[in-house]
Amino acid sequence: MSKVLILVRHSRPESRVSSFKDFERSLTNEGISDSDKMARFLLDSGIIPDFILTSAAKRAIETSRIFAKTLKIGEKNIKSTRDLYYSSANSILDQINGISDTVNCLMIVAHNPGISELSSGLSSGRAFYLENTQVSLLEYEIDSWSRIKDEKPLKFKSITLEDIG
């Protein structure tokens, strides 16, 4: 059985301003448009997650909701957790390990540096720094998310907004 992992760095947020806590920063209009553009690319490519696990930060939740709407999977298939807010690659991996094995295509929406470190680590050590709205796609021949750290992906692809025009 195969599993597909979609790692997404949240879209472009408002600048850091003293009146907002980092956790509460929203997406800019450009971030909203970028999220929709990347989600449409995934939809057109037939890459549709069964479930989205997202950081509870406002910009990550907004990114996830746009992806869910565009991909037509519904907000009921989104779960947010503070455990993905500026978490390490190992912490994100712990969250992935807890996902039900009935989920075959999982999207994670989180922050740097953890999401980039995880993408780099899972893609056989290729160094990556995910930009806003950048996606890493990893496909595995596994039957359980708990085996992801022990296996190399069959396929790996990084997709930037520039790649999709």
Image (cartoon, rainbow, N blue to C red):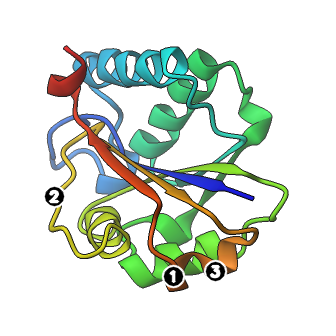
Mark 2 and mark 3 lie on one chain; the one further toward the N terminus is 2
Please state which of residues 47 and 140 is positioned toward the viewer in this rendering. 140
Label 1 to label 3, Cα distance in Å? 6 Å
Label 2 to label 3, Cα distance in Å? 24 Å
Query: Would you name the residue on which mark 3 appears?
Result: 147
Left or right of 127 in this view: 77: right
Label of residue 19 in the image? none
On the image, the x and y values in percent for residue 111 come to 33, 58
Q: Residues within 10 Å of mark 2 (few under 14, many from 20)?
A: some
**Which residue occupies 38% across, 54% down?**
23
Dot 1 falls on a residue whose secondary structure is helix
Label of residue 129 in the image? 2
Mark 1 and mark 2 lie on one chain; the one further toward the N terminus is 2
Q: Quadrant of residue 129?
A: bottom left
Residues at discs 1 and 3 in contact (Cβ within 8 Å)? yes
On the image, the x and y values in percent for residue 27 come to 33, 30
Left or right of 130 in this view: 133: right
Please state which of residues 13 and 38 is positioned toward the viewer in this rendering. 38
Q: Quadrant of the C terminus?
A: top left
Q: Residues within 10 Å of mark 1 (few under 14, many from 20)?
A: some
Query: Would you name the residue on which mark 1 appears?
Result: 149
Q: Quadrant of the N terminus?
A: bottom right
**Which residue occupies 72% across, 31% down?**
75
Dot 3 falls on a residue whose secondary structure is helix
**Tag 3: amino acid:** Arg
Q: Quadrant of residue 99?
A: bottom right
**Which residue occupies 46% across, 65% down?**
153
On the image, the x and y values in percent for residue 143 come to 75, 68
**Tag 1: amino acid:** Lys
